[in-house]
Amino acid sequence: MNVWRIALRLLRRDWRSGELYLLAAALVITVAAVTAVGFFTDRVETSIERQGSELIASDLAIDSSAPIPQTLDAEAKARGLATARTVEFRSVVVADQGPRLVNIKAVDPGYPLRGELRVRQGVDTLDEPAPQGPSQGEVWVESRLLALLGVRIGDTLGVGETRLRIGAVLTQEPDAGRSFFNIAPRVMMNAADLEATGLIGPASRATYRLLIAGEDERVASYRDWLEPRLAANMSAESASKARPEFATAVDRAARFLHLATLTTLLVAGAAIALASHRLVERQTDAVAVMRCLGAPRRLLIRIFVLRLVLFGLIASLVGCLLGWLAQAGLVDTLSGWLGEELPPPSAAPLLVGVTTGLVSLLGFALPPLLQLAQVTPLRALRRDAGRPRASAAITLAAAALALGLLILWQAQDPTLAWKLIAGVLGALATLILCVLLLVRLAGGLAGRTRGVWRLGLAALARRPSGAVLQIGGFGIGILALLLLAVVRLDLLRAWEDSLPTDAPNYFLINIQPQEVEPLRDFLAESGIERTDILPMIRGRLTHIGDHQVEPSDYQDPRAERLATREFNLSYGTEPQPDNRIAAGAWWPDAEAPPQFSVETGIAETLGIALGDTLTFWVSGHAVSGPVTSLREVQWDSFNVNFFVVSSPALLRDEAATYITSFHLPAGSDALIAELSRRFPSVTPLDVDAILDQVRQVIDRGVLAVEYVFAFTLVAGLLVMYAGIQASLEDRRAEHGILRTLGAGRRALLGSLAVEFAAAGLLAGLLASVFAETTGWLLAEQLFELEFSFNPWLWVMGVLGSGLAIGLAGTLATYPLLIRPPLQALRRAG
């Protein structure tokens, strides 16, 4: 209890004296950045899981190409789970204006188990929720089918061997988004009418689906029971994996935001280290008195550790509160990304925030404080006994260990984390070496100058370790500001420019071979300048080399899906303009032997390498060829692109349809109407809405980056302030001696301006080099953007930091000059 009481009393005294303010600010900023991102990503992940259930209209969906056995349904009901069945297939419906190809879904009364059906009862009425699907004897149809067939609500459709009444317009269907290209209009009917249509037989191509929903534990238990009983033609999809494209995007965004918080952690860690150095200086006399009163070193160590932990807990909790408030702002900044209100977060980010705060504080601040236990009692009587010198090796090792642990934790990717750790350690080592060289250069220049210039430059060379700490701190702070103010803007501007204003906003699919040339002529006559009309052949990947492709061979959900789906294949004599050959070589001409070119991402996902032989099942037979090149594809160009492209000799004799994309200027909608009239089999797809979403994501992504890096900005300012404060105690004694020896205030003020301006120039030079290099690496290696060197970065980094730090340092130390020299000498001696 005595240790606790002493620790609390000392902590309260230190806080009242203001000695902990800087340390607390750095720690609060670190924890706030970590928890703000943590709270936000936690809410997003919960929302994705909820949306996943709505996307598959259940918590678990079983798909099959044949009727699903009743035993699976019965087992689910026995476990207290709700079930529903659907059957989907393509067929033709008939009305007065002729037949029309449609997607038909037959549902039973339990559908949907998750999500909401919405219908419209009349042309001019609003849509409304529907508790279940159509009643027996009626169908619900998409509004475009009414226009295509020239029918109205209340008319009948011929569906197979029966006729069903159109009961409503289908406006929302939870699992309609499972297929991106729903080209044919959708029709929903009651499963009880399916037999009467005569459309489903033993050889019919249909997708049978069993939907299951209930408590998470029961669904998980049922899935464990189900997996060994799934037939080869069945697959199970859970809600957590129902939004792979969304989950992947959020996962990448979460990693980026977590890494952005690491930038704050790096900068704030420097502030914590500088503030700890200052705290050790201020605590030395108090510890000497405690040693005179008989306090053993072991007791002092216990008090220091306990006091630091208590302080860390309090500051971390304040940081968590600030992070909670900050994530609300981040959610508001990114509102609309998920299209709904996010659920409240869990308490897990609180634990992450507190742990991060304690680890960073103990790693950066504890080693210098533990050196206080080495203070001799003689220090209380003789000030010239000096302060204990912290072991640089121990201090750096502890900081590196803490930083490494936090990077491994936050990066959530061991490979990326180790690369980042190596980069950080290499950058710090380079920074220290450069500072030492520059300080030595300043010392050499001091001997060749006179007056305040000599005094100011000599001050840098006189304390090399202090200069390394101070200039290093200034450099890290300026680096953070440059990355935020200049490099960030360059990268984000390049990101925004990567999606041009004339990006294709229309796709034309289902183009028949005989329509290719007439369509190309029509588009040219209409002012559409460049149109690549490319062949598209459907094929399923069956073998990679001699190995048969099985979904069960892959643990990655995306690879598992790719192993079960059909690919859109194409062929050509040249790669697309937005493709880059990353490995291997493209075939020389149209007569080259059979071979494939594969996109690098899908090659990595499926384990495809150069030289592998790929076999696809195309139109009832196998086609094979070696992989002779890997391509990097710029997917966000919105041009037509393919995962797998072959030489013409391999696929040109296969049955194919054609596809193209082009940019349609605003106000040219009449062109699409004329195109549909002249080419009725061609299906136009308007992707303007998708383009708008992409641009919106980019715009809001820019805001998110700025929002998170605001913490880094504050941390950078703290580092520079801490760098100025770190040497005040030594300067007080030096100025007292110089004043006693006759140095005037004006001369000392000039020397301070020279010293801090020189430190600012050196720090700015190093920060500019690191910022420019970092920006280039990020642009070229990570974002694959064009990066142009910015001359303003050097102006702001070198001259701006020299002026700003010179002015701030001079103003901060000016109070030392107006105090009587005797006061400074008494305090120092």
Image (cartoon, grey):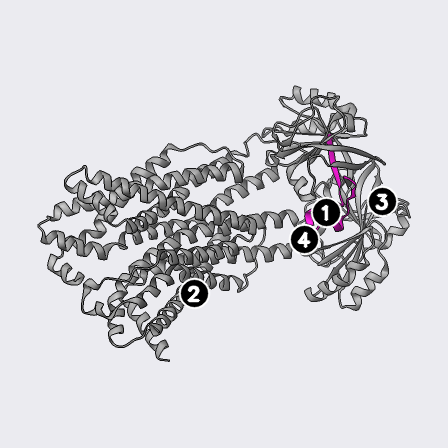
Q: Residue at x 66, y 20 (%)?
A: 524
Q: Report the amino acid beneath label 3.
A: Arg
Q: Kindly report the distance in space between the C-alpha atoms of the residues bearing marks 3 and 2.
A: 59 Å
Do callouts 1 and 3 mark residues in contact (Cβ within 8 Å)? no
Q: Which mark is residue 317?
A: 2
- Image quadrant holding the N terminus, namely bottom left
Which residue, given by chain and number where applicable, does mark 4 sit on? 241
Which residue, given by chain and number where applicable, does mark 3 sit on? 205
Helix, strand or loop under label 3: loop
Residue 494 against residue 403 in the figure, above or below: above
From the top left corner, tell me how far across and down residue 200 is, in percent.
88, 47
Q: Residue at x 36, y 77 (%)?
A: 3
Where residue 659 sits, quadrant-wise, is top right
Which residue, given by chain and number where applicable, does mark 1 sit on? 561
Q: Residue at x 64, y 57 (%)?
A: 50
Q: Report the amino acid beneath label 2.
A: Leu
From the top left corner, tell me how far across and down residue 438 is, in percent.
30, 41
Span highlighted in magenta in the image: 545-570
Do callouts 3 and 2 mark residues in contact (Cβ within 8 Å)? no
Residue closest to the eye, 691 or 782 = 782
